[in-house]
Structures are given as structure tokens and as C-alpha cells.
Image: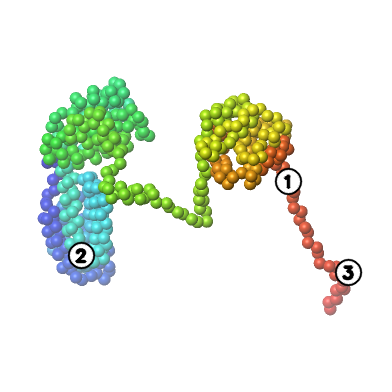
Amino acid sequence: MPNAGPKPELSAYEMAIAEDEILKNLRKRKTHSAAGPDGMSYAILKKLRPDIQSKECEMLNEVYATEQLLDKWRTTEQRKTQPTFGDNALDSQLDVGYFHDLTDEFVVLAADAGASVEVIHRRFQEVTHRRRRACTTTTAVGSETRYFAATTQQFRYVHHYWFCAANAELLKFFGKCKDGKTRVLKVSIENEELALVDNKAVKKDWEKDYDTLVKPLVEDDVPCYILYRLDYKIPTGYAWLLLSWVPESATVRQKMLYASTKATLKLEFGSGHIKEELNATTKEETTLKGYQKHKIDFSAPAPLTSREEELAEIRKSEVKTDFGIDTKQKTLGGINCPISDPTSQALVDMQRGAYNYLQFRIDLDEEKIHVVNAANIDILKLPSQIPTDHARYHLYLFKHQHEGNHLDSVVFVYSMPGYSCSIRERMMYSSCKGPFSATIENHGIEITKKIEIDNGEELTEEFLYEELHPRKLNLRPQFSKPKGPPSRGAKRLTKPQATE
């Protein structure tokens, strides 16, 4: 295995035994200082060993050095005149403080070793729980400290032996390859570190350069990382593709090494620049077709069992109801009847200015809207165009002046001559009114006002003007002042009494 750090002096088992011996020696002292055992024990430890809590010391050296200091303190004449250490004092000052350092080191080493977020979170919860027990229960300190010493030692072993960092040359190239001129670079693990093997500049677009530049970099039975620059940009610059080439013929050691170092490579290069990742085990997967197939498979929905598909269909068909004070329920918008081709052409002609009046009817059997009349009609002749026996839709361009401005307003009129029409006709015209007016606006005709009438006699110039520009009544309610109380008569004048 590659060795990227110093080898620990002792195993976790040996270290746990050493710590257990220290704790046994500490618990032999059962008397407490009247002057405060906690403060006294801490002061003496700091005097004998100033760096007792320094994180620069190795954990194993810390254990043995502390044991030697305690043995030395036992044999000194100062112990005869100074208060002895209390059991609770030593546990709170030495073991719990040392336990706290183990907690922090465990989390850092676990993250560096590539442990998943779930594992780190679960172990950290155990760390917190056990540390609380150690701070409140003296008898639990020994076992809890040994547990975390061994666990941290395991992660230190993984960290030292399975961690490959990038060398200086690769880090320097990472800094300048993001200028847009580099298309692809190949990185391999050599001499227990990430090293740059080859790089190519941009020639054409990324699809044409892909097979030309990537194929020569992929070798049989030789794992590597390939960083390929795409042509689209993200907030951090150009997007990159990370291709991990680990063939099936690679050794178990190589597979584990490249899998554990992938996170380090992304961190050194900048994970914000890597937009896509591809893990390839065959040469076909490293080609452009393999990459495109990977994107299609990645975007495809997840495979579902027949039971899961049935549940998904049930969820889609479920009607969710939400009723409340502020709830707005969407009602039926109407029936969208199709329009005939002449009707569509008539709307286009009116939008161009060829006509100022269009009349439409609904074929009840065909359930289709047809144009009946398309002409230029004066406002005075407009009432005569309204049928008295059937419902109709009308579109009229009303030209008028308002406050000195010349306006061209399109008015949509829905005429329904009372109960002389059948129920089906009234329902069809009422239901198709909204969708048909939306169809008119989709043809570029903006409807200014929608009006419903019973007969054509209502369609006068004054009526349309009032509908478009209603009068503003500036009537302010007057304040009725309440009457005062009735008269109480003349004001009385009183003579002040003289003071003696």
C-alpha cells in the first residue's frame, strides 16, 4: 500500500492498554484537595507539561509522556507537601480534555479518509453521546477513551495509507488550464501522488475533439483520470467532464486506490468546475457514443416495478382538495369549439383593417364556429345586424373620440334574444364565449370591452360610449354635524367672596 504519512508507533490495541494503565494509576488517589482539586491538578499538570493540550503532539507520545510525568510526580518530595490529585479532578482535566481532542481528530480524519456523510454524522453523534457520559460518569472515562482512541487510530491508518495528493507540477497546471485553451488532460497516480501525464489544446468543437483526443489517452489495463473541457459555460467558467478509467482487468489495489483518491482530485481541481462525471470500465464507454449513451441513461426515469408503476398512476389520478378562507378554486373555463378556416381568415383580415364588423354563429350539430357576415358597417346600422331568433357573437371596431383623443376600440358583443332559443343553444353560446374570445385575441385582435345584450336596439353610439368610458361620479358625502344641546339660558355671573 502507498504510504503518504508517518506510520503510527503502536497499534490501537497497544495504545488502549497503555491508556488503561494510566487510568488505573490515576484512580488510586481517592483523596481530594480542600483548596479545589480541579484547579490544583490542572495547574500542576501545566507546570510539569506545558504542552499537555497541544494538538501538535502525536496521540501515542501524549499517552506515554503523560504516564511518565505521573510516575515522576509520584516519586517527588513535592507530593508530600502538596495536596494529592483527586480522581474526579484528573478525569475532568486530563481524560475529558484528551477525549475532546480525540473527538475533533476523529471527525477530521474520517472526512479525509473519504467516509460518507452518513457515517461521519452517525459516528459524531456517538462521539457526542459518549463524551457527555465521560464528563458526568467517572467510571466510564476509561472505556470511552479507549473506544475513541482505537476508532481514531483506525481512521488515521486509512488516512495515512490511502491518501494521494497532487504534486506541485499538477497543482500548477490546474491553475492555468482553466483559461479556455486546454481541451483535455490525463492524470495518473505515480509514486503515491497524483501526477500530470499528458494534455492537449483545443482544436475544434468538443464533439469533434472528443474521440480524436481521448482515445489515445486510454490505455489497456492502466487506470487513469481524464479531465475533458466542454464548450458550455457555468458560473465558475467552462464546464469539465471527469472521466474515471478503471478497467476490469485492473488489480484490486488499483481499483481501491483510484476510487479513494477521486474525491481528492476533484478537491484539488475544483469541484465547482466539474459538471459531469463518467465511470468507464470498457473502452466503448470512453468514446463519444458511450458518453452520449451515459447522458441518456442518466436522464431516463428510474426503473420501476409493476407495483410502483400502479402507485404512480394512482398518485397522478388523485384529486387533491384544499379548502380554506384564501383558497381559490378554478372552475370550468368553458368549451373550446374549433373555428372554421374562413373564420380564421376573417379574423386575420379584420386585424389588418379590411373589416370593422364580423358576425359568428355556432353550428350545433358540427359544434364549430363559422363566420356569418364580414363587412364595414356604420354605427347607425349596427342594431339591424342583430338577429331576433338566434344567438350570435359580434365583433365591432368602434371608432370614437374621448377627451380629445381618437380611439379605435374593439367590442365583443354576445347577443342572446331571451328564451326564444333552445336550451342547448343557450348553453353552447354561453360555454364557448370565453374560449372564443381568447382565440380572437390570439389572432392579434385586442378586445377592449365585452358586452351581453338581449336585442339590437341597445347597440347605439351612446350605449357603446358609456360602456367604454363610464361617467365618474364625484359625489362626496357631506358630514352631518350633530346638533348641540338645547339652550340652557344666560350665563350666570357670580361675585367672588372676599377672603378675610
Camera sees residue 400: no
The residues bearing labels 3 and 1 have C-alpha atoms spaced at a distance of 47 Å
Element carrying mark 1: loop
74 and 112: which is toward the camera:
112
Q: What is the distance, in whole Å, between disc 1 and disc 2 at their CAs?
A: 87 Å
Mark 3 is surrounded, within 10 Å at the Cα level, by few (under 14), some (14 to 19) or many (20 or more) other residues, namely: few
Image marks 1 and 2: residues in contact by CB distance under 8 Å:
no
Place residue 112 in its image quadrant: top left
Which numbered disc, 3 or 1, marks the residue closer to the eye?
1
Q: Which residue is mark 3?
A: 490
Q: Which of pointers 2 and 3 lies earlier in the amino acid sequence? A: 2
Amino acid tagged 1: Leu
Q: Which residue is mark 2?
A: 140
Using the image, determine if residue 136 lies above or below residue 1: below
Q: Is residue 270 left or right of residue 387?
A: left
| Residue 238, image x, y percentages | 33, 30
Front-most of residues 334 and 92: 334
Amino acid type, callout 2? Ala
